[in-house]
Image: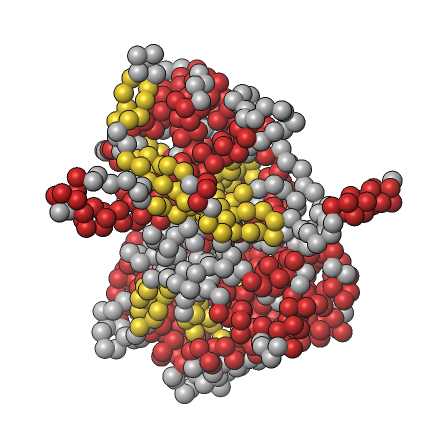
């Protein structure tokens, strides 16, 4: 979620009065804003996307809840020590969280372990469980100037109070109290893995803990809601799918499917078929990755131990599902095996993506290319079985945080020309198109960008002691560190530029400041090595007097939402260079576009749609397409073919391999060179030549500032599609059956009678 104060003031429309009031008290609002901790309760783009969606749902007047875990320790703080990443716990709650309100009256029990027995009536019952309580904390999510406030409800694990009094006599009372911590560990810390599945018992408990508490909450709210009925509570679940929509944000909450079945069958007494119909019509699943190592597959032994009743239910769901497969493809055992929810090769595992698809009425990818890939590849059999389920919902970002809050200079410039309607109708930025070639408007955009760059340069000097040239091109690559995102390819370009300067110091060179930032999962050896290499390269480049001001390299420590808000408005060039077919969507790419940075990227994720919107002439596209990548992998990729054919590339790989950047330990980066030459799944050497040529084109166009600014303005003008408002309107229309509403609710300070009168007057005026 990042920080809340500035965002709330902007959405309530009180930023200027608050600023003025504090100023009159002799206080600085910016100092106050800097005191707030980031709420880093998620990983990378997936977590940040959910935050954008919450903002859009409130702004569009949708009655929506976000649910998650109130981790005591969020995503770790990253420190760089001798160029290496060190993790520190993110104790974000140490001074409390002023935005949250604990709601102990809605505390709910969550069960683990135990066994399943059959009752005399032939029903299944889950007994002898261990109970942990889920305590909700509510955080307000205000819409943009419409007086709508939705809720983000985060669950915290609490131990049950009662422990056995016989411990008093056994003298083990102290241990009994200490053991309560084990239950509360469930919400202690976030697993910091992005695009990687870690099959740990605690992680499974976290996923079920969130799902079980959330579904009880949803069912309670459904049963106590009136919907025009006079009954105190409702026990008829026929209307449940019409009143409740549950969106599974990737497979992490996929246990919602067997849990809702358990509640409907075991607790509410519905028969299986009716419960299944309700569950399927209520749930929908968003897939966020095609990387095999990221797909969740829980060991059956884990589920048997921790959630025995749910394993029963999953087996029964699978039985009925395989009957449908048999109907469609009679006698095809291969289909049965590949489409089963239970994977039988080696230790038995439950494929959570398959469970999510079977238990949902809608399945979507998050960019057109990604949605096409899951239909043609990853989930092809499921698509053939139920083509009507599959959809695309291209991601978006909220313009409130990602331009209004973080780039007030640009926001003011747009609002002065066209009013403020674009803030909730981002497609109106199309009005900027005719101004792309206007020299006066170009100068105004240039001035805003230059001020943002100066501000970032001051921050870099203060935080890193790094002096950068604000007139240089700010070339920025910020995202989680992962081999598929190819920060290593960027590093190879830095080394290539360095070698060229050294070879011919007097040649014409477009000055660049390359900034790379992002966290590597703590156990991800290769990603941490890449961070170290970038820092070692930076050390050599930045201290070489021949290079001087032409090239600077900075690793941005502890990249997070708050830092992104300062970096993105100052960027000239945005690096979106994943291997085509690997990035589901990307949302950083959209933030940069909205703030007038040009993109160098592959035709991957949402880059494809960005290129369609702005025209290929306004984006720097390089490298293989997803089809070409697949063809090369089928044919067999031999990195040495590229290494031997390109002297510049050979020099770069040799320098990494031979310790040019790590003289004290020549073997430091041998592993990275080995990956590049022998085990590279992401084909860096195949795209190197195309990438370098495109970077040369970038440097050449940057020299022509008028052309660069024209392209930048076209980027801003065509970013309307990438508002999360548009994404949420599509979810509402195509999946949830929920209409958007731009009506502003009456101000809380206005007496009810007056508000009603105003509403009637507005209605008459409209008629």
Q: Nearer the viewer, residue 577 or 628?
A: 577
Left or right of 638? Residue 45 is right
Q: Hey, which quadrant is residue 232 in on the image?
A: top right
Q: Position of residue 701 (x, y in %)?
A: 61, 71
Write the residue at 49% across / 66% down: 36
Can you name the residue that lies furthest to the front here?
A: 169
Residue 724, placed above or below residue 480? above
Q: Nearer the viewer, residue 535 or 341?
A: 341
Q: Hey, which quadrant is residue 245 in on the image?
A: top right
Residue 659, placed above or below residue 323? below
Residue 288, placed above or below residue 673? above
Residue 331, placed above or below residue 141? above
Can you name the residue that lies furthest to the top here?
A: 121
Q: Position of residue 371 (x, y in %)?
A: 52, 40
Q: Position of residue 674 (x, y in %)?
A: 27, 60
Can you name the residue that lies furthest to the left here?
A: 170
Whether residue 679 appears in this view of the structure is yes
Write the residue at 52% across / 51% down: 139
Left or right of 20? Residue 84 is left
Write the residue at 30% across / 42% down: 161
Write the residue at 54% across / 43% down: 65
Q: How is the image coloured?
A: secondary structure
Whether residue 199 appears in this view of the structure is no
Q: Position of residue 388 (x, y in %)?
A: 56, 27
Quarter holding the C terminus? top right
Left or right of 646? Residue 391 is right
Number of marks drawn: 0
């Amino acid at each position: 979620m990042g920080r809340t104060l500035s965002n709330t003031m902007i959405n309530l429309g009180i930023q200027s009065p608050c600023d003025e009031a504090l100023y009159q008290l002799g206080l600085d609002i910016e100092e106050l804003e800097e005191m707030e901790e980031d709420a880093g309760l998620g990983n990378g783009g997936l977590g940040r996307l959910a935050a954008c969606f919450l903002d859009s749902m409130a702004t569009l007047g949708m009655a929506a809840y976000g649910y998650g875990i109130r981790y005591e320790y969020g995503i770790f703080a990253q420190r760089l020590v001798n160029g290496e990443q060190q993790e520190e716990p993110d104790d974000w709650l140490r001074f409390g969280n002023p935005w949250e309100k604990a709601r102990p009256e809605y505390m709910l029990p969550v069960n683990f372990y135990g066994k399943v027995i059959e009752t005399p009536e032939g029903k299944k019952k889950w007994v002898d469980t261990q109970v942990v309580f889920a305590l909700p904390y509510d955080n307000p999510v205000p819409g943009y100037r419409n007086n709508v406030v939705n809720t983000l409800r985060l669950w915290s694990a609490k131990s049950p109070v009662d422990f056995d009094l016989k411990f008093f006599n056994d003298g083990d009372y102290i241990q009994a109290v200490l053991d309560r911590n084990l239950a509360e560990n469930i919400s202690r810390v976030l697993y910091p893995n992005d695009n990687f599945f870690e099959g740990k018992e605690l992680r499974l408990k976290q996923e079920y803990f969130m799902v079980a508490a959330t579904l009880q909450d949803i069912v309670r709210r459904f049963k106590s809601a009136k919907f025009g009925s006079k009954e105190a509570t409702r026990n008829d679940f026929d209307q449940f799918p019409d009143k409740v929509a549950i969106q599974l944000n990737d497979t992490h909450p996929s246990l919602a499917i067997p849990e809702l079945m358990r509640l409907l069958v075991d607790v509410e007494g519905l028969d299986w078929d009716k419960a299944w119909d309700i569950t399927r019509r209520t749930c929908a699943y968003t897939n966020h990755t095609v990387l095999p190592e990221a797909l969740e597959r829980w060991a059956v032994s884990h589920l048997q131990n921790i959630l025995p009743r749910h394993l029963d239910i999953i087996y029964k769901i699978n039985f009925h599902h395989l009957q449908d497969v048999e109907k469609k493809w009679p006698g095809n055992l291969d289909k049965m095996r590949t489409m089963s929810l239970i994977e039988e090769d080696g230790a038995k595992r439950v494929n959570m993506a398959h469970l999510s698809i079977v238990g949902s009425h809608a399945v979507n990818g998050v960019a057109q290319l990604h949605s096409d890939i899951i239909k043609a590849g990853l989930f092809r059999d499921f698509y053939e079985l139920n083509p009507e389920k599959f959809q695309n919902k291209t991601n978006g970002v909220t313009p409130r945080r990602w331009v209004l809050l973080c780039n007030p200079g640009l926001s003011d410039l747009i609002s002065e020309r066209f009013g403020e309607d674009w803030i909730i109708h981002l497609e109106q930025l199309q009005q900027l198109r005719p101004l792309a070639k206007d020299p006066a408007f170009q100068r105004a955009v240039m001035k805003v960008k230059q001020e943002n760059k100066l501000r970032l340069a001051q921050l870099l000097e203060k935080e890193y002691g790094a002096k950068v040239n604000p007139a240089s091109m700010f070339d920025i690559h910020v995202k989680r560190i992962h081999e598929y995102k190819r920060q290593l390819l960027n590093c190879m370009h830095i080394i290539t530029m360095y070698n060229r300067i050294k070879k011919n110091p007097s040649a014409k060179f477009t000055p660049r400041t390359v900034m790379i930032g992002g966290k590597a999962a703590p156990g991800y050896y290769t990603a941490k090595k890449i961070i170290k290499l970038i820092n070692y390269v930076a050390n050599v480049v930045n201290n070489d007097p021949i290079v001087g001001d032409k090239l600077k390299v900075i690793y941005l420590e502890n990249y997070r939402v708050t830092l992104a808000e300062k970096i993105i408005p100052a960027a000239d060039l945005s690096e979106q260079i994943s291997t085509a077919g690997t990035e589901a969507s990307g949302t950083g790419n959209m933030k940069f576009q909205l703030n007038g940075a040009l993109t160098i990227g592959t035709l991957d994720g949402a880059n494809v749609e960005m290129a369609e919107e702005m025209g290929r002439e306004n984006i720097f596209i390089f490298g293989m397409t997803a089809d070409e990548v697949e063809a090369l992998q089928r044919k067999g990729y031999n990195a040495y073919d590229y290494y031997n054919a390109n002297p510049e590339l050979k020099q770069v790989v040799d320098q990494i391999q031979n310790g040019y950047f790590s003289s004290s330990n020549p073997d430091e980066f041998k592993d990275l060179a080995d990956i590049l030459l022998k085990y590279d799944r992401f084909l860096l050497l195949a795209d190197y030549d195309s990438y370098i040529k495109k970077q040369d084109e970038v440097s050449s166009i940057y020299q022509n500032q008028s052309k660069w600014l024209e392209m930048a303005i076209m980027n801003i003008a065509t970013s309307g599609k990438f508002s999360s408002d548009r994404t949420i309107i599509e979810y509402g229309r195509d999946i949830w059956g929920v209409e958007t509403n731009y009506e502003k609710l009456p101000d809380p300070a206005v007496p009810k009678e007056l508000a009603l009168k105003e509403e009637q007057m507005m209605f008459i005026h409209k008629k």
